[in-house]
Image (cartoon, rainbow, N blue to C red):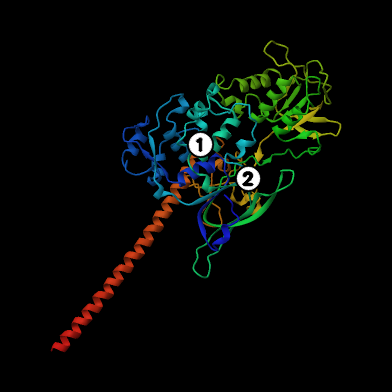
Amino acid sequence: MDLHDKEMLPGEILPVVIIGNGPSGICLSYLLSGYTPYLSPEASHPNPLLNSKLGEQPHLSLLEQDLEYLCEGLEGRSSNPVAVLFDSLLLPDSDFGLDHTSPLEWRYEPERAIPHLVLGKGPPGGAWHAMEGSMLTLSLANWMELPGLKLKDWMREKRRNVRNDRATPAEIASYYQHYVSQMSLEQSFACGTTVTSVTRQPGGQEGSPPCWRVTGLQRREGEELADGSSVSEEVPFSLLAHNVVLATGTHDIPARLGVEGESLPFVCHSFWELEAAISRGELDQSSDPVLVVGAGLTAADAVLAAHHLNTPVYHAFRRSVTDPGLIFNQLPKLLYPEYHKVHQMMTQQQQRPSAPPQDHAQNRNDNSTPSSPSTSPSSYTGYLSFPRHRVVAFRPDKKCILESDSGQRTVVQVSKALVLIGAHPNLSFLEDNGRPLGIYTNETITCRRNPIEVDPFTNSVVAADGPGMYAMGPLVGENFVRFLKGGALAIASNIAKKQREESGREEGDLTIDRLMDRWVDKQVTTQARAEVCVLDS
């Protein structure tokens, strides 16, 4: 959709603008487009308490029911209650490996549709289009799907089975893009857009209500040149909306260590920079080791990528390998064999100061040196982990200083350093990058440590400048697609409730007007009759 003509109707206020076209924004668009979940008459839920509650008002859609009441007593892997509820309804008992049929049925009710606009920098699917294409996703395939289109059915149409019940990011990105087309949502999506400002607008003197102004730039292809290429241009746009939804995700800005030398050219902050170096032939088994900093799944993917090249790897991270908060300690071994392998290497091939020296590393404290990697049949030769270590500095000669939590320092010679410790959302379009909206208002917004604070049953932003601002997905701490769908339900339900209340007020006003008209008519009639009586007398 081209936004260039959006100012043709000055003062026009859209009901909803969604910033972000990843799975969060797509799922919310689906619910706002008239697709409505009901309890199927023939279905039941394996949770008897929830099943009983759902049966109390089966004629009402899920969007019209009391979500807080339905959430009572439910437990799950998300801290957001509506996320647990919706996940339980879409995938009953999936955490136990069971494949219960969802008790929900979806009805298309266009009269319920709420006009909205979804803004995104790239094609529908968001950050999934930028992820590495061959690695398997962390989540099971059916956990990645959106309502109304089974991922496995879509995969069968492509004549390919989903390996190990998991799919690749490239497949998931293609699925999300197809989903928008399949569900006829394209008319609500404006791609190639970058939002630059979201501000609260006061009500106008002519009686227009307060609302949100969303401004930005939309990339458009310009005139075609003689060589067949075209020059793109960025066209400004400005929109007014009663409700604005923050659904940008958190993959925009890589997190940094904040140490000396971090801006040196051999220090990278994304997996894609490693891929680029590999494609250029810069890394092989004869290279100096690659230093991977971080203990998340992206860091593990980098270790695996280097493993395929037989490139030596140093792996430094702050946590202990037995820390229960480490993601590897939360994953079933049989389901995630590649990540279990990395965790096994992290555990079995640790740096041990008392062991013989290694060619690529030297210790500068207490005359101790890092150990050689394990040579057992199950080991990956060339890998060495540094648990409970931090990076002190990077040097121009490609040497990195590591320090253990006991203060022991080690200097390692590397070819590249990959700092993969997470990412922050780009909320530059909000005041102070959105910090006032976080749980800790003086810190940067992050998915884990400082998400945006929202009402748990409506996802409305607690500290917003006015009503009608919502946040969902990773911005509120939901990193998994299976749970971010609950945010879409909470928001769609609350917006629909507000619209029903507004319609009720308007109908009430009309009813009062009718009563007043009838009262005036009655008074006129009574007065006329009195005048007639006077004349007759």
Q: Residue furthest top?
A: 377
The residue to which callout 2 is attached is: 121
Residue sitting at 66 percent across and 27 percent down? Answer: 301
Residues packed near mark 2 inside 10 Å, few (<14), some (14 to 19) or many (20 plus) = many
Q: Which mark is residue 117?
A: none
Q: Amino acid at mark 2?
A: Lys
Is residue 525 positioned above or below 365 on the image?
below
Q: Position of residue 504 (x, y in %)?
A: 37, 58
Q: Which marked residue is nearer to the observer: mark 1 or mark 2?
A: 2
Q: Secondary structure at mark 2?
A: loop
Q: Is residue 144 above or below residue 520?
A: above
Q: Are marks 1 and 2 in contact (CB under 8 Å)?
A: no
Task: Residue under label 1, please give it.
Answer: 483
Where, by quadrant of the figure, is residue 251 drawn? top right
From the viewer's side, name the closer residue of 354 and 310: 310
Type of amino acid at the residue the image marks with label 1: Phe
Q: CA distance from mark 1 to mark 2?
A: 23 Å
- Say which quarter of the image contains residue 316: top right
Q: Residue 98's x, y, as percent?
A: 43, 24
In front: 304, or 230?
230
Regarding residue 196, the answer to whether it shows in the image is no
Q: Could you say whether the residue bearing mark 1 is in a helix, strand or loop?
A: helix
The location of residue 139, given as percent across then percent down, is 55, 29
> Which residue appears at 83% of the width and 30% of the height?
398
- Is 52 in front, or is 1? 1
Query: Does any portion of residue 16 appear in the rendered image?
Result: yes
Point out residue 455 in the picture as x, y percentages from the top left corner.
49, 47
Q: Is residue 394 above or below residue 283?
A: below
Who's the residue at 71% across and 18% down the image? 349
